[in-house]
Amino acid sequence: MATGQAAKSARTVVISGVPDGLLHNDVMIDILTIHFQMSKNNGGDVEDVMYPTDKKGVAYVTFEDQKVVESVLKKDEHRLEDKRFSRYYPLKVTRFSENVFSSVTCVLDMSIFKEQFIIEDLIQEMKESTDLSFGPLQSDGHISLQGSFPDIKLLRDFLLLKAKSISGKDKREKGMSHQRPRRRQQHHGLTTEMSSFVHGVEKQVVVLDTDIYHYMKSFFPRTFIVNDDTVISDITDGDVTTLYIENAGSRSDGGQALRVKKKIENWSIKLHKTLRKERIDFKEHTRDEKQRYRRACESVKPHYPRVLISFYDTHIDVIGNPSEIFEFTKKVSNEIQSLFRSR
């Protein structure tokens, strides 16, 4: 990338609705290039077109100038036309996403708090303290919400605090539980409450996205290096990995586990904002196909040392910097095509 030029991911758009199987791939690339270079389509100089991709009817178009991305996105309708088509094909143009770890959806059962809090006030407090999107509160106390994994995790910790507050430890608060919470109490914020809760506790818990955890262990292992007085254990359950950080020994520093927790959480939040995950799906799911994909990934991997590859039975997950992931998946696709031609 030339000095001063925007990252490739920032100069790339995702094209959906590309007619699949009508023409040779090279011809379709030429047609897409011409379309997005035309001024009537708000286009400009095209640096690269990635087609086909692992998703049917989807292409990636990279422009030389990032300003063209904004221009192309402003056009109300894109119609792909060519004399070799019997009709035109409407295209959907969207911005290349920088982050696929940004959206998690879950449903909360708030009814467990109805004896201690005014549910509407508690939800309002949650809305003011996070960047999550909330659905309507249902009659049974359920409410759906969506947002980033770190925000979901922070809300989880916040609700654990609320659950702890109604366990009977504080008689005075329990006696006042049916009263409307004071506005002053509602603005303490999640971070402050968590800080007061964990202070001095020997065992700390951190909930991470499993992909982020694996990336951290692969490329930032020092994050998990602790002294002999601190022990870290992990339990992975699908997309979520829970870390338990404990102080060990009578001479251990009481705040060491908390400091390790904060370091891990800070790295997790930073990586959530900077990483992207792409999935390469297997089409045939045969043993030979999976081996070809593995060979292709291993062949390209040395050129992208900061990319993490995770192999599964049905797909491959590729995690790393957005621009590197974009280039990595394209080279893997080219490598796969070469392997097929050499058969």
Image (tube, rainbow, N blue to C red):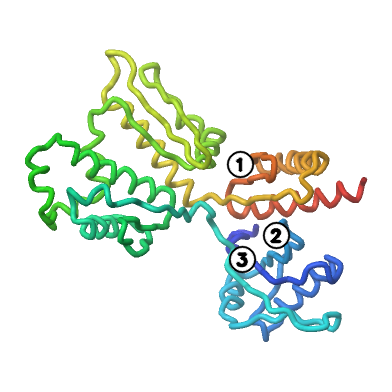
Circle 2 sits in a helix, a strand or a loop, which is it? loop
**Labels 3 and 1: the sequence-earlier one:** 3
Image coordinates of residue 246 in percent, x first then y, are 35, 24
Whole-angstrom CA distance, mark 2 to mark 1, is 24 Å
According to the image, label 2 marks what residue? Answer: 55
Q: Residue at x 26, y 34 (%)?
A: 198
Q: Residue at x 50, y 36 (%)?
A: 237
* Number of the label disc, if any, that sits on residue 306: 1
Image coordinates of residue 128 in percent, x first then y, are 27, 59
* Number of the label disc, if any, that sits on residue 11: 3
Q: How many marks?
A: 3
The front one of 263 and 139 is 139
* Residue, far top: 250
The front one of 100 and 216 is 100
Circle 1 sits in a helix, a strand or a loop, which is it? loop
* Label 2–label 3 contact, CB within 8 A: no
